[in-house]
Image: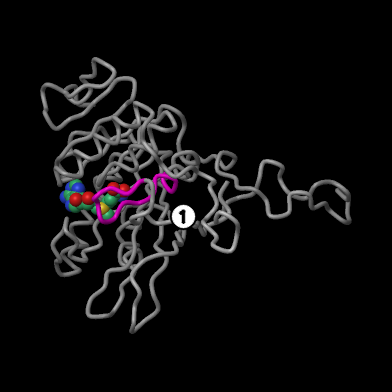
Amino acid sequence: MDTEMMAEESLVQENPKNSNAYSSKNLGVIVECVDNLEFMAKLPSGHFKLIVTSPPYNLGKEYEFRTPLDDYLKQQEKVIAECTRVLHPQGSLCWQVGNYVWKGEIIPLDTVLYPIFRQHQLKLRNRVVWHFGHGLHCTRRLSGRYETINWWTLEDNYTWHLDPIRIPAKYPAKRHFKGPNKGKLSSNPKGKNPSDVWEFPNVKSNHPEKTSHPCQFPVELVERLVLSMTDEGDAILDPYMGVGSSIIAALKHGRVGYGCDIVPEYVAIARQRIKSWEKGELRTRPMGKPIYNPKMPNGGHK
Ligand SMILES: C[S@@+](CC[C@H](N)C(=O)[O-])C[C@H]1O[C@@H](n2cnc3c(N)ncnc32)[C@H](O)[C@@H]1O
């Protein structure tokens, strides 16, 4: 570990040797405004139990320039190679992506990124579909309402905990009606596997986590990955951190959060969110909160 990056003295402080670095011993945060390849070059190999990120999709958003798809993939290749280097042998690499769109044609980014991950001997464990209810209304094709989280690991003995992310069973009182377990509860009392289709609201204007960033992912989405793929004290990295949603998810569960972004405004917001979290003032959508249902009283919320 780079000693300068590990210079952590008080609970929350700006690192005096690097005005971009925000580090804290107790919170465990390293956040920098820098290109991710430069950031990762300083990180030790095999360190991160979870690398979770959502890269730019090459759509010409305010934080990116559109480039030919091949150039985009070459750049992604470099970042994925470096992520693989810093990934812990029992770690998980989660790449959250949607579609690249060109002249009305869609190219699901995970399909073109797949060979790159395979080149690095990574194995795909799940392709989680993240479904959300809101977005652009398309006129010449169906409106897109999902993206994917592609979960890769290096080894077969990856860190994995199902219990912390179980969700309530649909019929918890259901019992076996025949066989040796007749009469016993048929479902796990701790809840069921959340499956590979996840529904979380995307961060639009009325979401409690909304900042000025155009494409945040929700903290609860990352929390599910943190809880199932890491242990307390493990290090988590987001190389395209944006406004630090992954860092917040890490901190909420006693993990160490590392992240970088090239846009100073987003890094400033990430730092502000970390400070608000530390004061207990940051609002995040709670895990397990049901999706708003207009047919139910108060939308199904308490
Ligand atoms: C889809 S956004 C990620 C948003 C993030 N998940 C959040 O919740 O805030 C992609 C981010 O990558 C950043 N970015 C683009 N190129 C980068 C690079 N070379 N190094 C670091 N960050 C970069 C952009 O500024 C943008 O904030």
Residue where numbered disc 1 is placed: 200
Left or right side of 3 for 290: right
Q: Which residue is drawn at the image coordinates 33% and 84% (left, top)? A: 140
- The secondary structure that dominates the magenta segment is loop
Q: Residue 218 in magenta? A: yes
* Residue 22: in magenta span: no
Q: Amino acid at mark 1?
A: Phe
User: Which residue is at 34% across, 26% downward?
Assistant: 279
Residue range highlighted in magenta: 209-222
> Which quadrant of the view contains residue 276?
top left
Quadrant in which residue 40 is drawn: top left
Of residue 243 and residue 15, the one placed in the foreground of this image is 243
Q: Where residue 25 sits: x, y (%)? A: 30, 20
Spot occupied by residue 95 in the image (x, y as percentages of width and height): 35, 53
- Image coordinates of residue 294 in percent, x first then y, are 54, 62
Q: Nearer the viewer, residue 101 or 154?
A: 101
The residue depicted at 15 percent of the width and 66 percent of the height is: 66
Tell me the SS state at disc 1. Answer: loop
